[in-house]
C-alpha cells in the first residue's frame, strides 16, 4: 500500500494546538446541541467536548487526535478537523459516483457527502457492517463524513511520539505524520481541500431524491 504524503516540511505543532483550541471553543454550543438531538433520534453522537483530551495535561507537550480504522490499519485526524462522531448512519446512494463516494447523510437537515478513504489510499475494500461509524469532518462547519471500520477513539499523545511523514511519490498529500505505534496521521486541511472529497449540490440532491424515492436503508459496498 502506498500512503499518500507530501514533501518533508516541519510540523508546526504550535499552530496545530492553536487551531484545536479555537475549534473547540467555536463548536462547543453546536456539539452540545447535536448530542441532545442524537439521543432523541436513537443515534449515538460523541462530542469531543464530552471527554477533553487535554484535561489535566500539559498543552505544550500533547496533541489531540481522533483515530479510526480502515482495512485493519489505524489512521487519525487532529481534533480541530473533527466536528463529531456518529454511529448507525443511514446513507442515500448517489448514482454514477466513484467507489469512494458512499452516499449522502442527513445531519440534522444538512446533507453531507460520505466517503470511504480505502480506495483512495489503495487499501483492501471495507468489509463487515458498512455504515456503523463515521467521522464528521470540518472546521467552521461540517463538510463531509469519512467512514470507519470501528468506533473512532479520542487520543492525546506526547509530541515526542509523533514523527513527520517520510517523502513519498504519491499524488495526494494527506499523510503528514506517523505515531510510534504506527498510526498514520492525515492532514485535515488537505483533506478538506481535496477535490476527491467534494460533491456538487446537484449530486447531493440526487442522493436525497433517491432516498425519498426508495425509502430504503442503503449500504456502502
Image (cartoon, rainbow, N blue to C red):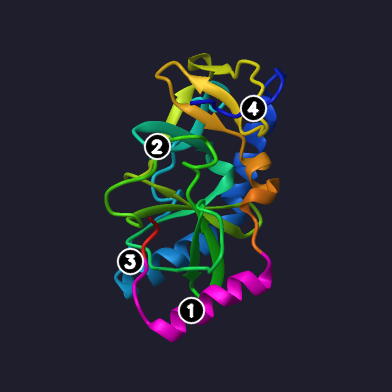
Residue at 64% across / 20% down in the picture?
168
In the picture of the structure, the residue carrying the numbered disc 3 is 43
Classify 10 Å Cα crowding around label 4: few (below 14), some (14-19), many (20 and above): some
Give the tally of numbered discs: 4
Classify 10 Å Cα crowding around label 2: few (below 14), some (14-19), many (20 and above): few
The magenta span reads 200-218
Question: 210 or 139, which is in the foreground?
Answer: 210
Does residue 202 belong to the magenta stretch? yes
- Tell me the CA gap for discs 2 and 1: 28 Å
In the picture of the structure, the residue carrying the numbered disc 1 is 210
Left or right of residue 99, residue 126 in this image: left
Question: 47 or 206, which is in the foreground?
Answer: 206
Does residue 170 belong to the magenta stretch? no
**Marks 2 & 4, CB-CB < 8 Å contact:** no
Residue 80 % position (x, y): 58, 43
* Badge 2 or badge 1: first in the primary sequence: 2
By secondary structure, the bulk of the magenta-drawn segment is best described as: helix
* Residue 57 seen in this snapshot: no
Residue 186 % position (x, y): 56, 34
* Badge 3 or badge 1: first in the primary sequence: 3
- Tell me the CA gap for discs 3 and 4: 37 Å
Residue at 37% across / 36% down in the picture?
71
Disc 2, SS:
loop
- Tell me the CA gap for discs 2 and 4: 17 Å
In the picture of the structure, the residue carrying the numbered disc 2 is 124
Classify 10 Å Cα crowding around label 1: few (below 14), some (14-19), many (20 and above): some
Is 140 located above or below residue 149 in the figure? Answer: below
* Badge 1 or badge 4: first in the primary sequence: 4
- Tell me the CA gap for discs 3 and 2: 28 Å
**Depth-wise, is mark 3 or mark 1 nearer the camera?**
1
* Quarter of the figure with residue 189: top right
In the picture of the structure, the residue carrying the numbered disc 4 is 170
Amino acid at each position: 500500500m502506498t500512503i499518500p504524503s507530501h514533501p518533508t516540511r516541519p510540523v508546526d505543532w504550535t499552530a496545530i494546538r492553536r487551531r484545536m483550541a479555537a475549534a473547540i471553543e467555536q463548536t462547543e454550543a453546536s456539539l452540545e446541541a447535536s448530542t441532545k438531538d442524537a439521543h432523541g433520534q436513537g443515534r449515538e453522537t460523541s462530542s469531543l467536548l464530552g471527554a477533553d483530551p487535554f484535561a489535566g495535561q500539559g498543552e505544550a507537550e500533547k496533541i489531540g487526535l481522533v483515530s479510526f480504522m480502515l482495512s485493519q490499519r489505524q489512521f487519525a485526524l487532529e481534533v480541530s478537523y473533527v466536528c463529531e462522531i456518529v454511529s448507525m448512519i443511514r446513507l442515500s446512494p448517489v448514482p454514477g459516483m466513484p467507489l469512494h463516494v458512499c452516499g449522502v447523510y442527513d445531519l440534522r437537515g444538512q446533507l453531507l457527502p460520505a466517503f470511504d478513504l480505502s480506495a483512495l489510499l489503495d487499501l483492501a475494500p471495507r468489509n463487515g457492517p458498512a455504515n456503523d461509524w463515521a467521522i464528521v469532518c470540518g472546521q467552521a462547519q461540517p463538510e463531509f463524513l469519512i467512514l470507519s471500520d470501528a468506533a473512532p477513539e479520542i487520543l492525546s499523545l506526547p509530541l515526542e511520539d509523533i514523527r513527520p511523514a517520510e517523502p513519498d511519490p504519491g499524488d495526494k498529500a494527506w499523510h503528514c505524520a506517523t505515531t510510534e505505534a504506527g498510526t498514520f496521521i492525515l492532514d485535515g486541511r488537505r483533506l478538506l481541500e481535496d477535490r476527491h472529497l467534494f460533491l456538487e449540490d446537484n449530486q447531493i440532491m440526487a442522493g436525497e431524491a433517491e432516498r425519498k424515492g426508495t425509502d430504503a436503508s442503503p449500504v456502502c459496498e
